[in-house]
């Protein structure tokens, strides 16, 4: 009886084992089916990923091609606008000048292009009769006194882009002392904050900020850039480095300044030997450069401006780029120049050393006028070497460059004659035709 019970129990256990085995087998088959489906799904995903990667590569290649096309079209637009342009900017009245608001000699005719300005001048003949004469001028753009720094830079930003694209670019400000040249190029005389408000900044700090913003975007397309800055002044026909440590200027007995010389490098580019070159690796670095240059720049008092800049200052930024994906390279240069005041000796009231400074300034500006006149006539010989200023600007005037001149104007009636002289000079510049700018590859 016990044996039958044992056999019966074993038979029951065997049935349970067989049932469990069938269940596990069915479960294993289901898992195999799921695994097979997932393998198929993974293969499909890998195929889709490969396709997407191929699409991304094609889009990146297309984006690089379109970037090259954008550079070419951008340059074409700039060529159509002219490789040498003139903007006029009239500063607002300040302080006691505001009392003369109703008697300003300047007016701005209504026109869609906003590129006209008119200066009125009264004169008295031998019979005591007063007659008024109007002098109309037309430039590429005219900025009225209420124009903001933002508005001015918007018109300049396309040229800044050209420098990043590998072209030589030059922007300079011309006009009498106190007409707003330094404000246009740099901003307020003193910027105490490392991050000043954008609305007060001039062309130089804005230009570098724009370049940083754009190089960051271009990094995603394989471009790597290095930026290097130089800052010098031309004082009494002598080059002075504005980035040397305080106490090393030529006037203070330093010998470094005497070794600065203008020369042509092996590729024919104008360079300055022994000048301090600083890596510009942040926007804050530019504010430091401006502050250091302001400390070293030569200033003195004249009747026209209590702290008149007595020298031409030249900020140069070299932009070298390399695309690690396409092998393309570029080598642009941006010259931003704040010229010394252009006032006549009779109005400056200069004597002694100030007289010598004014004579040197006027001589260099006269040389600039001679260069402009030679270019306008298409002369074979252009007298670039008649002054350090025109020698330094040889590539920017008549060379392989895109050039923009700001003629800055003081609107007060007392400055009417100086304003007329500045506007007439700017008209000569606007009539010039220079060569076609060519993009430069990095050496």
Image (cartoon, rainbow, N blue to C red):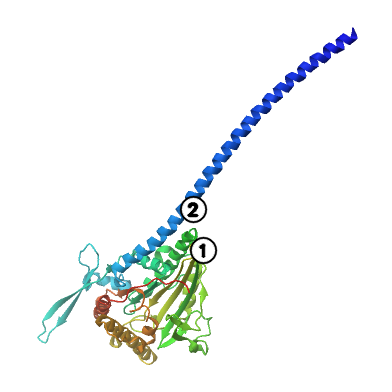
Other residues around mark 2 within 10 Å, as few (<14) / some (14–19) / many (≥20): few
Say left or right for 274 vs 416.
right
Label located before the other in sequence (1 or 2) = 2
Horizontal and vertical percent position of residue 256: 52, 87
* Quarter of the rendering occupied by the N terminus: top right
Q: Residue at x 24, y 67 (%)?
A: 115
Residue 212: image x %, image y %?
Answer: 47, 64
Return the residue nearer the eye: 49 or 433: 49
- Residue at the image point whose x is 54% and y is 39% from the top: 44
Residue at figure coordinates x 67%, y 26% from the top left? 27
In this view, the residue in front, 391 or 94, is 391
Element marked by disc 1: loop
Per the image, the residue denoted by label 1 is 324
Residue at 46% from the left image edge and 55% from the top image edge: 60
- Residue 301 seen: no
Q: Quick one: which residue is furthest to the top in this view?
A: 1
Visible in this render: residue 304?
yes
Counting from the top left corner in percent of width and height, residue 285 is at 51, 70
Residue identified by numbered label 2 = 57
């Amino acid at each position: 009886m016990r044996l039958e019970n044992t056999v019966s129990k074993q038979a029951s256990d065997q049935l349970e084992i067989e049932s469990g085995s069938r269940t596990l087998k069915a479960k294993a088959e289901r898992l195999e089916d799921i695994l097979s489906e997932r393998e198929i799904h993974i293969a499909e995903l890998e195929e889709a990923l490969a396709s997407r990667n191929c699409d991304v590569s094609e889009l990146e290649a297309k984006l690089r091609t379109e970037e090259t096309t954008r550079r070419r079209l951008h340059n074409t637009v700039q060529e159509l606008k002219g490789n040498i342009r003139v903007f006029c900017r009239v500063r607002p009245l300040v302080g006691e000048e505001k009392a003369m608001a109703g008697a300003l000699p300047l007016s701005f005719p209504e026109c869609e292009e906003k590129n006209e300005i008119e200066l009125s001048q009264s004169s008295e003949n031998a019979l005591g009769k007063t007659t008024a004469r109007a002098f109309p001028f037309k430039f590429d753009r005219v900025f009225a006194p209420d124009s903001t720094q933002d508005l001015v830079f918007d018109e300049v930003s396309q040229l800044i882009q050209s420098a990043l694209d590998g072209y030589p670019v030059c922007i300079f400000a011309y006009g009498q002392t106190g007409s707003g040249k330094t404000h246009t190029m740099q901003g307020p005389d003193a910027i105490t904050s490392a991050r000043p408000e954008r609305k007060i900044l001039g062309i130089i700090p804005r230009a570098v900020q724009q370049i940083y913003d754009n190089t960051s975007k271009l990094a995603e397309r394989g471009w790597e850039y290095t930026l290097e800055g130089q800052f010098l002044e031309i004082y009494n026909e002598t080059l002075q480095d504005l980035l040397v440590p305080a106490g090393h200027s030529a006037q203070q007995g330093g010998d470094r300044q005497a070794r600065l010389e203008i020369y042509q490098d092996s590729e024919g580019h104008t360079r300055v030997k022994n000048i301090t070159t600083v890596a510009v690796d942040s926007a804050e670095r530019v504010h430091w450069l401006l502050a250091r240059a302001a400390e070293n720049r030569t200033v003195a008092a004249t009747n026209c401006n209590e702290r008149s800049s007595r020298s031409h200052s030249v900020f140069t930024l070299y932009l070298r780029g390399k695309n690690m994906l396409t092998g393309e390279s570029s080598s642009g240069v941006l010259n931003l120049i704040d010229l010394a005041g252009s006032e006549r000796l009779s109005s400056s009231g200069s004597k002694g050393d100030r007289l010598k400074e004014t004579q040197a300034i006027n001589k260099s500006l006269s040389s600039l006028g001679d260069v402009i006149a030679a270019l306008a006539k298409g002369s074979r010989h252009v007298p670039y070497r008649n002054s350090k200023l025109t020698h330094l600007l040889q590539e920017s005037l008549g060379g392989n460059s895109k050039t923009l001149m700001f003629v800055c104007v003081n609107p007060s009636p007392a400055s009417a004659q100086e304003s007329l002289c500045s506007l007439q000079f700017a008209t000569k510049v606007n009539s010039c035709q220079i060569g076609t700018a060519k993009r430069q590859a990095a050496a």
